[in-house]
Amino acid sequence: MDEFNDILNEWVENRTSESGYNIQQAKQDDLTRLMQLVVNERMAPDVLEYEEELLERILARTRLQIEFIEINSLELQLEKDIKLQLMIVELELERVNYLIRTYLRTRLSKIDKFTVYITKNGDMVKRLSPSEVSYMRKHFEILTTLYKKQFLSRLPELLQLLDDTGGGISMIEEPDLDKPVFVKVVKTISHSIDVNNEEVELLQDGIYVLRYSAIRLYIMIGDIKLI
Amino acid sequence: MYGDAADKLVADAKRSTQLTHLPLYQGELIQNIINETNDLQAEVEHLTNEEIVSQTQSQGDRTNQCQLFISHLAMRRNKRCLLAYQRYRAERLQYMSWLNNTTGITVDEPGAAPSGKAADSLNHNEEEYLKKYNELIINYNKEFNESLDLTGDIEPPKDIFIDVRVLKDVGEITTEYGVFNLTKDSQFFVRYNDVARLIQQGYLQRL
Amino acid sequence: MGNYYDLDDIIADNQKLPCKFNVTVPGLGYLEGNIGQPLDANTKLNLPLWLSSVLAICEVSQDSQTTFLDLIHPEFFNNKVINAIRANAVNIDLHSILPNYYKLCEKWCVMFSDVELIEVVSQMLKERSNEINDYGQNPKQISSMAGNKFLYSLDEFEKRLYKISTESHKLSKEWFHNQD
C-alpha cells in the first residue's frame, strides 16, 4: 500500500505547478471531505447543501487523471513502470468516481422522493445544483405526464392535484427530520441538549443515536458528524 | 364495497416488490377503478344537488352529509391507490434505466436473451416514460467528466483488474495495456471493463 | 411524512376494524347490504381503517362531542392478548393475531394515545428483537423446531428485521474474514 502511495505522490508532483502549497495534503483533505459528504448524504433524511466548489476541484483533478491515462495508453507496448502507474491511476480514478457517483445518485433519489416538498420550499431548492434543479423539473414533468395519460386525466377534476393536503392525508412527502441517526461528536458541545425532556451531554469522540432534528445544526457546522 | 378494486391493485404492486420482473400492467383493473371513481363523483353531484334543493340541513348538522363525505373518502382512496401503483412501477423503470436497461424487458441474467413473456409487461405510456427518463439521465450525465458514468450498480469498485482464462478462441484484443492474443486455455491479467462482455458471452472465465 | 405513496401504509389502512355507529345515517345502508336504506344507530360493522379512522374523529355536528362512529377496542389489543404479551412476549404468535401488528398498533396509538398499549408493545418489541438478533447471528438455529415456530410467529415488520439481521451479521462475518 505504501508503495502505491509513493507512486501516486510521484505522479502528482510531476503534474503540479503550484509551488509552496502542499498539493498532496489538499487532495487528501478533499477526498476525506468527499467521503464524509457521501456518508452525510446517505444518512441524512433531507437533501443537504450541494458542495459545488469541492466537486469542481475533484472533477478537475479527475480530468487530469483521464488525460494522463489517454496520453500514456496510446503506445501499445508499454514499459513496465508506466504500466504500473497507469494501473494505479486507474484504480484511484475508479474509487473517486465511485464516491462521486454515490454522492450524486443518493441526492437524486432523495430529490425524486421529495420533489413536491422541495419545489414549495425556496430554501430547499437553494441546496440543489443547477443540474439537479433541471433534472427535478424535467423528471416531474415526465412523471406527471405518465400519471395523466394513464388515469389522472380521466378522474374527476377535483382529484387531479398532486399536492393536495385535504382528506386526512397529505400528498406532499416530507423528509422525516426526526429520524434517528448515528453520530460521532467531533468537538464537545458546550451545553447539553434536550431530547424528550432528557438532558444529554455530547462529549468529544462519543458515539450516539439521536434524532436528526436535535443535532442538525451541529452537523452543518461540523461539530458532529454522521456515521 | 368501494375501494375493493383499488386494494387489488395495491396488492399487485406489493407482490411485484418480490419479483425480478415487472408484471403485466393492470389496464382492466385500473379502468374499473376509474369507472367506480367517476360513478362516485356522479353520486356526489347528485347528493349535493339534493341538499341544495331540500334544504333539510340545520346549521352544523353533518349527519345528512355523511354519505357525501364517505363518497369523497372513497374517491380519494381510489386516487391514492392508483398513484401508488403507478409510482411504484415508475420507480422500477427508473431503476432499470440506471442499470442501462432501456428496453424495459427484464431478464434473469445479464446478457441473456429476453424471454417473450416479459416483453409485454409495460403499457405504451410506460415505455415512453422509460425512454424519456433514459434521455434525462443521459443528459444529466453529460454535465460531468466523460469517465464518470453515473449509471450502473452502486457497488464499491472491487476488482478493476482480474485474472481470466480463455475458454474459446477470441483472437487479438487491443486494450490500453497492450494487445492480448486470447487463445484457448491461456490466462491473462486484464482490466475488467475491457473483457466484461466476453465473460458474459462465455468466451472467458473469471478466475 | 413520507406516507402517501407507501404501499405498506396503504395496505395497513385497509385493515378492517369493528365499529359502532352512534347516529342513524341516511343512505349508508349499502354498507351492510341494504342499498338505499339508512344505517341505524348502534349498528356494528367492520370497516376499513381509511374510512373508520376519519369517521371516528368527526363530530356529527358542530356543537356535539359525539362522533359518527366509535372504534370498538379490537381483539388484537384486548386484555387477553395484553396479558399474554406481558407473560411471555417471545412466545406469542403475533402473525396469527395480526400480520401487520406493529403497524396497526402505531396507527391506533396515533389516534387514541393509548399509553398502556404503547408501553406493552414497546417492551414486546425489545424482547422479540433480542430473540430475532440471536437467530440472525446463528441462522442455523432457525431450522430447529423452536426456531421454526418463532419464525412463523413473526409479524411483517419483524420479518423485515430478521432479514436485515441475518444479512448484516453475514456481512460482518465476511468483512472480518477478509481482514485476515
Image (cartoon, helix red, strand yellow):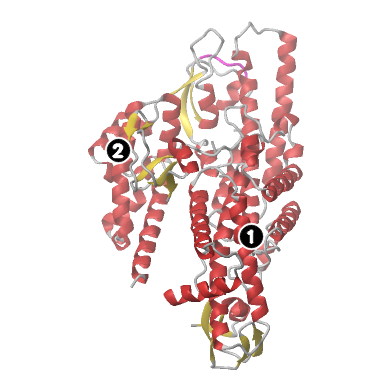
**Residue closer to the observer: B107 or A24:** A24
Q: Where is residue A55? Give x, y as percent.
A: 60, 56
Q: Quadrant of the N terminus of chain A?
A: bottom left
Q: Where is residue B157? Give x, y as percent.
A: 52, 68
Label 2 – label 1 distance at C-alpha:
42 Å
Q: Which residue is mark 1?
A: B98
Range shown magenta: C23-27
- Residue at 57%, 83% (x, y): give it: A82
Residue type, mark 1 in image: Trp
> Relative to B154, is A145 above or below?
above
Q: Which residue is mark 2?
A: C123
Residue type, mark 2 in image: Gln
**Residue closer to the observer: A85 or C100:** A85
Badge 2: chain ID? C
Quarter location, residue B178: bottom right
Quarter location, residue A140: top right
Camera sees residue A198: yes
